[in-house]
């Protein structure tokens, strides 16, 4: 019955009261169908995808199309937010990455939602356990970012990825076709995310180079080093952070097919460790 109702709503997407439909579909646990409906309504509002790459972004009509689509995607983000809030109650002492990792491990746990990660059910349970909330959120995110039916909508992917960043969730664990570009453009203040994306998806050579580059930048860019003329000493780079980056680089270099040598990375690590020990001894003398 729900399936037939959804088909009717999608056929008349341009005439659907989105808020009313969302309320009714969520009441019966039809989150998967609601996402499809929001996508269909967004497409009906901007069938030629004019809001994505407009010639004149300031054009009032283009802006109207843009916000009309965002209104649809916001309904989907509210679904994510509800499950995310519920999941945090269960894992209050864990970080976001730990919660999402646990969701992947628990996706086939006995007594839980079961194999929800493999296939998102048409109807979710009326009563969702706190322990299952993150598993369901992971399945919803995977459905949106990796599902074939949504791959052509870059704006939709952008909205989902931005929500993940704002919520502190790791977007690099998903296979969105727009993820690399998103991280390069919109996560410049968190460059390690791009490294993790490359590593997570087995792009060992690129990941190794990215980690090494980031470690070198950390070494040369003294964190807002003040000029000696200002009478303040230069801030030293965090050696421990550089070592962690280089450890990841070495791990990637050791992977089959990386075409990267691990020896130069190990030498850099040895030099940093020696510098760390030297600083520790200097600190002891001062005390």
Image: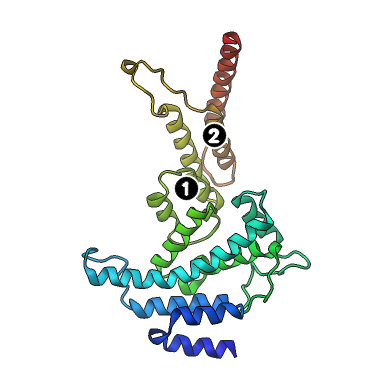
Apparent side of residue 71 relative to residue 148 in the rendered image (left or right):
left
Residue reaching furthest to the right? 110
In the rendered structure, are the residues bearing label 1 and label 2 in contact, judged by CB atoms less than 8 Å apart? no
Determine which residue is flagged by label 2.
Answer: 246
- Tell us which disc is closer to us: 1 or 2: 1
Q: Position of residue 132 (x, y in %)?
A: 69, 65
- Disc number placed over residue 194 in the picture, else none: 1
Residue reaching furthest to the top? 285
Apparent side of residue 207 relative to residue 127 in the rendered image (left or right):
left
Q: Nearer the viewer, residue 54 or 224?
A: 224
State how the image is colored: rainbow
Q: Residues within 10 Å of mark 1 (few under 14, many from 20)?
A: many
Of the numbered discs 1 and 2, the one sitting upstream in the chain is 1
Q: Secondary structure at mark 1?
A: helix
Q: CA distance from mark 1 to mark 2?
A: 15 Å
Vertical placement of 259 versus 81: above or below?
Answer: above
Q: Nearer the viewer, residue 49 or 85?
A: 85
- How many labels, in total? 2
Q: Position of residue 125 (x, y in %)?
A: 68, 75
Rendered residue at 53%/78% (across/down): 23
Q: Residues within 10 Å of mark 2 (few under 14, many from 20)?
A: many
Vertical placement of 271 versus 106: above or below?
Answer: above
Q: Secondary structure at mark 2?
A: helix
Rendered residue at 38%/24% (across/down): 225
Apparent side of residue 51 relative to residue 76 in the rendered image (left or right):
left
Rendered residue at 32%/72% (across/down): 49
Asked which quadrant contains residue 276, the reply is top right
Which corner quadrant holds the N terminus?
bottom right
Q: Position of residue 37 (x, y in %)?
A: 47, 79
- Whether residue 142 is visible, yes or no, is no
Which corner quadrant holds the C terminus?
top right
């Amino acid at each position: 019955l729900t399936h037939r109702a959804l088909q009717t709503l999608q056929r008349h997407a341009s005439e659907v009261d989105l808020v009313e439909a969302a309320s009714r579909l969520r009441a019966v646990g039809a989150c998967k169908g609601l996402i499809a409906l929001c996508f269909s309504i967004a497409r009906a509002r901007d069938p030629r995808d004019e809001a994505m790459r407009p010639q004149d972004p300031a054009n009032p009509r283009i802006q109207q199309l843009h916000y009309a689509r965002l209104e649809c995607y916001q309904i989907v983000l509210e679904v994510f937010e509800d499950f995310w809030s519920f999941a945090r109650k269960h894992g209050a002492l864990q970080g976001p990455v730990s919660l999402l990792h646990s969701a992947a491990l628990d996706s086939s746990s006995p007594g839980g939602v079961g194999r929800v990660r493999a296939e998102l059910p048409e109807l979710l349970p009326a009563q969702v356990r706190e322990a299952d909330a993150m598993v369901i959120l992971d399945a919803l995110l995977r459905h949106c970012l990796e599902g074939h039916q949504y791959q052509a909508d870059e704006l939709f992917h952008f909205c989902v990825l931005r929500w993940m960043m704002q919520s502190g969730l790791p977007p690099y664990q998903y296979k969105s076709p727009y993820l690399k570009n998103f991280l390069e453009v919109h996560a410049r203040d968190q460059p390690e995310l791009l490294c993790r994306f490359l590593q997570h998806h087995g792009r060992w050579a690129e990941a190794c180079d990215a980690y090494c580059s980031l470690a070198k930048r950390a070494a040369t860019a003294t964190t807002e080093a003040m000029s000696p003329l200002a009478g303040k000493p230069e801030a030293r780079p965090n050696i421990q952070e550089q070592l962690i980056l280089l450890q990841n680089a070495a791990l990637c270099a050791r992977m089959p097919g990386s075409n990267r040598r691990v020896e130069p990375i190990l030498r850099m690590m040895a030099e940093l460790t020696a510098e760390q020990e030297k600083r520790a001894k200097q600190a002891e003398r001062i005390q």
